[in-house]
Amino acid sequence: MDGTLLDSEGLSSVATDYGFRQVLGRDLTPEENAQLVGRPVKKVLSQWFPDQGEKIYSTGRKYFESNIESIQPYRGIPDLLARLHGRYTLAVVTSSHRTDAEKLLGHAGILQYFSFYIGQEDTNYQKPDPEPVLLALKMLGTPPAESIFVGDQPYDIIAAHEAGMKAIGAVWGTGKADDLYLYSPDFIAHNPDDVLRIINSL
């Protein structure tokens, strides 16, 4: 979802930086930010800062929620989903909270294209562990070999392959082709139209 469907990672980073400054009195470093992208921020911050992680998260969370309506889908995403919808069953697997997923996808006008969405509360482990992807496959009722995962982070590629799926690396948002190639994605999509082209070629 974040960084693939929605241009939301920027606000997430700004919100976490706000939490850092308010609680720790310093900025979020680029290295720390890179390690948070695509991961459950609350859990990671609690691991990094056992005494202050919850406060950092809740402070940043308030900032995020107050600006959540600024988040929009990437250009080409609504059209891609409209073209795929009906031909294929679509679902979202995200490390974000379920309430955020519903709110963000709804505000972006694309919630109706998905049969369901899986958030971090739905499994014990999140990507790169394959558990949430395997749950999605079970709910979809399709075998891994007949399913495709599209994501912008190495965690997505790892989880998809561990679940036995083909993985498309999305690099129109926060994803970086050089980073994703290290994890051997089956395809790289430079824009949403590439996703449809890849699917039609299979």
Image (cartoon, grey):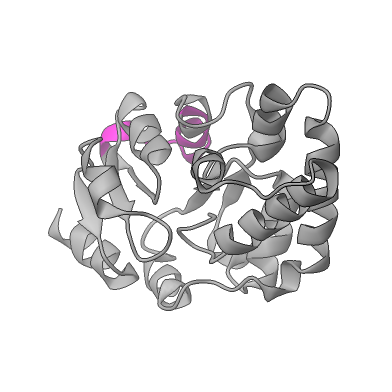
Q: Which residues are magenta?
A: 134-145
* In front of the other: 176 or 109: 176
Membership of 18 in magenta stretch: no
Horizontal placement of 152 versus 99: left or right? left
Question: Please, which residue is most extreme toward the left here?
Answer: 201
* In front of the other: 112 or 97: 97
User: How many callouts does the rendering have?
Assistant: 0
The residue drawn where x is 85% and y is 55% is: 62
**For residue 165, above or below residue 75:** above
The residue drawn where x is 62% and y is 72% is: 108
Horizontal placement of 195 versus 101: left or right? left
- Residue 33 at x, y = what percent? 55, 46
Membership of 142 in magenta stretch: yes
- Residue 37 at x, y = what percent? 52, 45
Could you tell me if residue 143 is visible in this image? no
* In front of the other: 58 or 5: 58
- Residue 119 at x, y = what percent? 64, 40
Most prominent secondary structure in the magenta stretch? helix
- Residue 61 at x, y = what percent? 80, 51
The residue drawn where x is 68% and y is 67% is: 106
Residue 125 is drawn in which quadrant?
A: top right
**For residue 78, above or below residue 55:** below
Horizontal placement of 22 versus 178: left or right? right
The residue drawn where x is 49% and y is 62% is: 5
Could you tell me if residue 201 is visible in this image? yes
